[in-house]
């Protein structure tokens, strides 16, 4: 991985945390940029277009959840990874973060080696999907069409934009129609084995996907997981 080509934006209202994160990332060769609140972070993100944005949840002027939601509305930042850095471990804050479009969580306090290992893991996990040389892939179903490169679901000539996690969930289920994906497999493939999320996270995401695409093709298999049935 050529770290010198990767820009990482750090947004936290605590100066010592910004210094700690920036120092350890610079040692690995990453380009780092910092902001001390969500509003400034959003403005800086628009200018530098970072590959990875690390957001604190609790910040003045604009918190991390709100900033994440705003970032996900910017087309130029649609493939940027967003990771929350937080000491909060409640299920509701995690669900709110993922609903806003976050890709992962890192919990404070964290040791330098573990932090860097986590960053490399996150970047590798999404490197293929964010590769600008990746060829466009389109999957056509009876219910809708999925354009993987543009992160779009197209239904009756209407484009439906899903947040990254919702899109990846739909992509996973449609990769093998009629296969039942166990909850554990879904968590591992979409969030990664090292990510701890609340039990309701997947249910919230599935409900939102169903609401947005407006077709009853995602089936719940009680006690197991979910599957995709293409409509005839």
Image: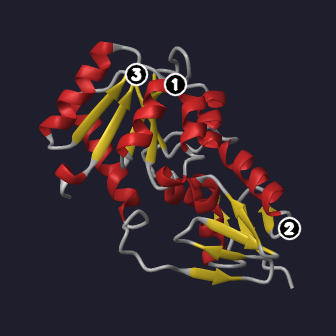
Instruction: Indicate which disc residue 215 carries.
Output: 2
Decide: few, some or many residues near mark 2? Use Cα within 10 Å; few <14, some 14-19, many ≥20. Answer: some
Left or right, 230 with reference to 132: right
Left or right, 172 with reference to 4: right
- Upstream in sequence: badge 3 or badge 1: 3
Q: Which of the 4 image quarters holds residue 98? A: top right
The residue to which callout 1 is attached is: 57
Above/below status of 202 relative to 115? below
Image quarter (top left, top right, bottom left or bottom right) of the N terminus: bottom left
C-alpha span from label 3 to label 1: 8 Å
Residue 215 visible to an observer of this rendering: yes
Give the residue at x 64% y 55%: 166
Cβ–Cβ under 8 Å for marks 2 and 1: no
Residue 197 visible to an observer of this rendering: no
Above/below status of 123 relative to 21? below
Q: Secondary structure at mark 2?
A: loop
Q: What x and y, as percent, mark residue 52?
A: 37, 45
Q: Secondary structure at mark 1?
A: loop
Cβ–Cβ under 8 Å for marks 3 and 2: no
Decide: few, some or many residues near mark 3? Use Cα within 10 Å; few <14, some 14-19, many ≥20. Answer: many
Q: Secondary structure at mark 3?
A: loop
Above/below status of 118 relative to 210? above
C-alpha span from label 3 to label 2: 40 Å
Above/below status of 10 relative to 169? above
The residue to which callout 3 is attached is: 12
Left or right, 173 with reference to 55: right
- Upstream in sequence: badge 3 or badge 2: 3
């Amino acid at each position: 991985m050529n770290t010198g080509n990767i820009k990482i934006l750090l947004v936290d209202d605590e100066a010592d945390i910004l210094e700690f994160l920036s120092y350890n990332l610079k040692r690995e060769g990453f380009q780092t940029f910092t902001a001390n609140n969500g509003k400034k972070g959003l403005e800086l993100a628009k200018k530098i277009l970072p590959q990875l944005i690390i957001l604190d949840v609790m910040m003045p002027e604009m918190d991390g959840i709100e900033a994440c939601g705003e970032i996900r509305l910017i087309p130029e930042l649609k493939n940027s990874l967003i990771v929350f850095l937080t000491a909060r471990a409640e299920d509701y804050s995690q669900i709110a973060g993922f609903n806003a479009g976050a890709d992962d969580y890192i919990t404070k306090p964290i040791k330098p080696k573990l932090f860097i290992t986590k960053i490399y893991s996150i970047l590798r996990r999404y490197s293929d999907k964010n590769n600008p040389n990746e060829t466009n892939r389109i999957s056509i179903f009876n219910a809708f069409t999925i354009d993987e490169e543009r992160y779009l679901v197209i239904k009756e000539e209407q484009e439906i934009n899903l947040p990254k996690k919702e899109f990846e969930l739909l992509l996973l289920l449609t990769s093998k129609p009629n296969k039942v994906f166990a909850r554990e497999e879904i968590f591992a493939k979409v969030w990664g084995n090292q990510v701890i999320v609340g039990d309701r996270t997947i249910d919230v995401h599935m409900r939102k996907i169903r609401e947005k695409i407006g077709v009853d093709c995602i089936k719940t298999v009680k006690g197991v997981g979910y599957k995709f049935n293409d409509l005839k």
